[in-house]
Image (tube, rainbow, N blue to C red):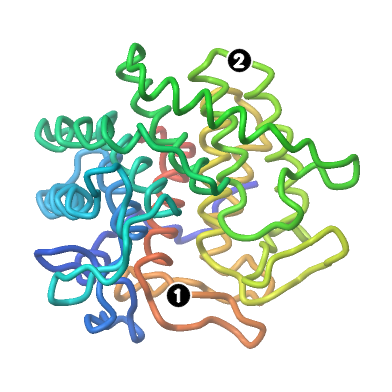
Amino acid sequence: MTLLPGTPAPNFDHLLAMSDDRGTFEHALFAEPRSAHGYCTDDVARVLVVAAREPKPSAAVRGLAVRSVTFLQAALDPQGRCRNRMNVKGLWEDSASLADCWGRSIWGMGTAAAHSDDEWVRSSSAAFLERAMQRRSPWLKATAFAALGAAELLSVSPDNDAAHALVLDAAHRLTRSKGSAGWPWPEARLTYANATLSEAMIAAGIALDRPSLMNRGMDLLDWLLDRESREGHLSVTPVGGRGPDDHGPGFDQQPIEVSALADACARAEAMESDDRWVNGVVSAANWFLGDNDRSVVMWDPTSGGAFDGLEEGGANLNQGTESTLALLSTLQHARSIMCGVR
């Protein structure tokens, strides 16, 4: 499988347009930020992931990383929990929790600690992690996000006890459910960012030197790729989820599901050179270029933003931050695998 002609390089213009001195706005009306809707820690953590791992980032992208770290530091409470929603005036509108925002913050800070070329970003991220990694979430997806960040930190600080303990606990949680022969997935239904569970198993297996855990993650990823493909292209789980008796295509398909597959396939490919994983990344990039259930291009070449969902009648043309981050992340992996730029 090859990338479709015209595959773009990652373009941060729209993400920068969605950002101000405080953070990155969550929603957009077409390409215009809806500033009144405020900011979201979930998104800012993912901004940090893509900004920190961008090779040779521009000054503007480095600035995104710095602002994201500052935002996430403010989101963290003294007990190591995270708040998720800030209004346009800079006031928090929710209580701190151990939900996805906590896990994604650890993912973002762990990625920054391991990959950022900015010393302040690396050291500040590491300090954040020491507090946040003491906690544990009751939610499986949040646990998986956190495991990704802790595993990233272990890749550069292999003796970090807090990161090791978090990854060890996450590995136990992630493998507690074995599913069934017909439905091996560890949850009763596919929901959102599903491949994150597979990727976390792969990352934990690498960090803990447990090949069996890494292989289980790869087996589940292979199963998920098959489940979320149709007629040679990705046909991912829609907003309503997908269970054993559900058959596609389903809509509204979200870009986050596509990028989670690309993330997991890129991590698998880094450990095992296999066409399955290369094709998974290529399929994800091609989904944005129109190789999907409606043959609709899912990004705007003018702004650089991605559209918010693939609906039965076509694309939702709003270009929110989550969707744009999904495009950027996927294109980073495609560039890395196909062009060797890491």
The residue located at (13%, 76%) in the rendering is 89
The residue located at (57%, 45%) in the rendering is 140
Under circle 2, the secondary element is: loop
Of the two numbered discs 1 and 2 on the same chain, state the one appearing first in sequence: 2
Name which quarter of the figure residue 85 lies in: bottom left
Under circle 1, the secondary element is: loop
Check disc 2 and give the amino acid type.
Arg
Q: Quadrant of the C terminus?
A: top left
Name which quarter of the figure residue 114 lies in: top left
Whole-angstrom CA distance, mark 1 to mark 2, is: 39 Å
Q: Nearer the viewer, mark 1 or mark 2?
A: 2
Name which quarter of the figure residue 301 lies in: bottom left
Task: Provide the residue designation for mark 1.
Answer: 307
Q: Which percent across, then down, holds residue 261?
A: 58, 49
Q: Which percent across, then down, holds residue 38?
A: 25, 75
Side (left or right) of 218 relative to 206:
right
Check disc 1 and give the amino acid type.
Phe
Task: Provide the residue designation for mark 2.
Answer: 210
Side (left or right) of 192 relative to 337:
right
Q: Is residue 326 above or below residue 249?
A: above
Q: How many marks?
A: 2
Mark 2 is surrounded, within 10 Å at the Cα level, by few (under 14), some (14 to 19) or many (20 or more) other residues, namely some
Q: Is residue 269 above or below residue 144?
A: above
The residue located at (52%, 41%) in the rendering is 144
Whether tag 1 and tag 2 are in contact, CB under 8 A, the answer is no
Side (left or right) of 196 relative to 38:
right
Front-lying residue, 259 or 295: 259
Q: Which percent across, then down, holds residue 216?
A: 70, 28
